[in-house]
Image (cartoon, rainbow, N blue to C red):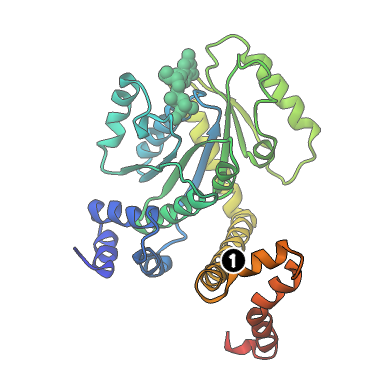
């Protein structure tokens, strides 16, 4: 078994096997994952991240495949993370779909990884964010994340993207209502896929009316594009629009702003996770927590004072930190 350092070095010199192993480390939250990420971090920050979301069956995998081919034509390398249990990449689809994916999965410039759904809230978000970093350090120019925009985890995953593409399709009944509000607001590009079906133009109109109602959040007005994923119609326009959005973000302050927000959230999450790890250890091993619970239920103790007692070391640390922050 190679050491974490060897794995990282192998991955950085292009070993796909090492890359896959590193992803498994973060996915399983192995203790070595932290060291690997620490070593990889300086090599990250170059990849451009595309999030593709929409209801199941809307054509996310089909479009991911087609966009990837467009990017490959321009000689960009691509990493794909499929966080969709129904995705062809995760084996949940029909044989025909899987066959269609074969040509990109056998392309050396493309790396595809599917992420299993996690039990713990936030676990999938973290595993996905870590996988993005690994693929970024590995040197992928673009990383595409495909996910169904349903749960909080998925919305958080989409928030890690530089360009978010929201796919809708005609004929889902209450089309627009079916899209999660939180995702509508962060979409940079709207795609009406399955434009070969009836109702595509009506959906385009509905979307543009809706977008017209919301106040512009930046100089980028999210365009609405029409595609037929299966036939490849509208795909080159979609790829060009992604590149135009990337250019827009890079030329303005957009990209650096997005990355600052992400770094801030990530640091806070990591600190909270560390602190809560110690709190759980304290409760489990050091404090007679069961007794405390009984006393709280019997009204002999109040939960507020107890919580303050347990977190007192952090409060004390804060006092020290305030006067001594030059050390941190
Ligand atoms: N008619 C039609 N079918 C499409 C189109 N795009 C994708 N599909 C089909 O819709 C089904 C679901 O596509 P898929 O990409 O797996 O959707 P996902 O669940 O969002 O990833 C597949 O059978 C595709 O072949 C399209 O533009 N028109
Ligand atoms: Mg899919």
For the N terminus, the image quarter is: bottom left
In what quadrant does ligand 2 lie? top left
Q: Where does residue 2 sit, x and y in percent of width and height?
A: 20, 65
**Direction from residue 28 to residue 291 in the image, left or right:** right
Evaluate whether residue 128 shows in this view.
yes
Question: In the displayed structure, would residue 279 be above or below residue 148?
Answer: below
**Direction from residue 19 to residue 118 in the image, left or right:** right
Q: Name which quarter of the figure residue 296 lies in.
A: bottom right
* Tag 1 residue: 290
Q: Name which quarter of the figure residue 115 lies in.
A: top left
**Direction from residue 216 to residue 57 in the image, left or right:** left
Q: What residue do we see at 78% from left, 31% from top?
A: 212
Q: Nearer the viewer, residue 121 or 232?
A: 121
Q: Where does residue 324 sit, x and y in percent of width and height?
A: 65, 90
Q: Residues within 10 Å of mark 1 (few under 14, many from 20)?
A: few
Q: Where does residue 52 sit, x and y in percent of width and height?
A: 52, 37
Question: In the displayed structure, would residue 175 be above or below residue 320?
Answer: above
Describe the element under mark 1 as helix, strand or loop: helix
- Tag count in the figure? 1
Question: In the displayed structure, would residue 294 be above or below residue 170?
Answer: below
Q: Where does residue 257 sit, x and y in percent of width and height?
A: 64, 58
């Amino acid at each position: 078994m190679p050491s974490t350092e060897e794995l990282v070095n192998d991955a950085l010199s292009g070993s796909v096997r090492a890359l896959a192993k590193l992803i498994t480390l973060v996915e399983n939250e192995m203790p070595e994952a932290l060291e690997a990420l620490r070593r990889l971090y300086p090599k990250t920050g170059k990849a451009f991240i595309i999030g593709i979301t929409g209801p199941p069956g809307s054509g996310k995998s089909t479009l991911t495949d087609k966009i990837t081919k467009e990017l490959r034509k321009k000689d960009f390398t691509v990493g794909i993370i499929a966080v969709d249990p129904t995705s062809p990449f995760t084996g949940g689809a029909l044989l025909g779909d899987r066959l269609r994916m074969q040509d990109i999965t056998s392309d050396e410039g493309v790396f595809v990884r599917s992420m299993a759904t996690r039990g713990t809230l936030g676990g999938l978000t973290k595993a996905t964010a870590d996988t993005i970093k690994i693929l970024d350090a590995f040197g992928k120019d673009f990383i595409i994340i495909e996910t169904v925009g349903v749960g909080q985890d998925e919305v958080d995953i989409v928030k890690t993207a530089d360009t978010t593409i929201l796919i809708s399709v005609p004929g889902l009944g209450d089309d627009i209502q079916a899209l999660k509000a939180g995702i509508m607001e962060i979409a940079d590009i709207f795609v009406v896929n399955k434009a070969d079906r009836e109702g595509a133009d009506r959906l385009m109109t509905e979307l543009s009316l809706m977008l017209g109602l919301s106040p512009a959040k930046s100089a980028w007005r999210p365009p609405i594009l029409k595609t037929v994923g299966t036939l490849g119609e509208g795909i080159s326009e979609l790829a060009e629009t992604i590149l135009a959005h990337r250019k827009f973000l890079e030329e303005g302050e957009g990209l650096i702003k997005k990355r600052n927000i992400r770094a801030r959230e990530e640091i806070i999450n990591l600190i909270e996770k560390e602190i809560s790890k110690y709190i759980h250890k304290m409760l489990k091993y050091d404090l007679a927590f069961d007794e405390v619970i009984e006393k709280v239920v019997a009204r002999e103790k109040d939960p507020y004072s107890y919580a303050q007692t347990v977190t007192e070391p952090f409060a004390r640390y804060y006092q020290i930190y305030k006067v001594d922050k030059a050390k941190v």
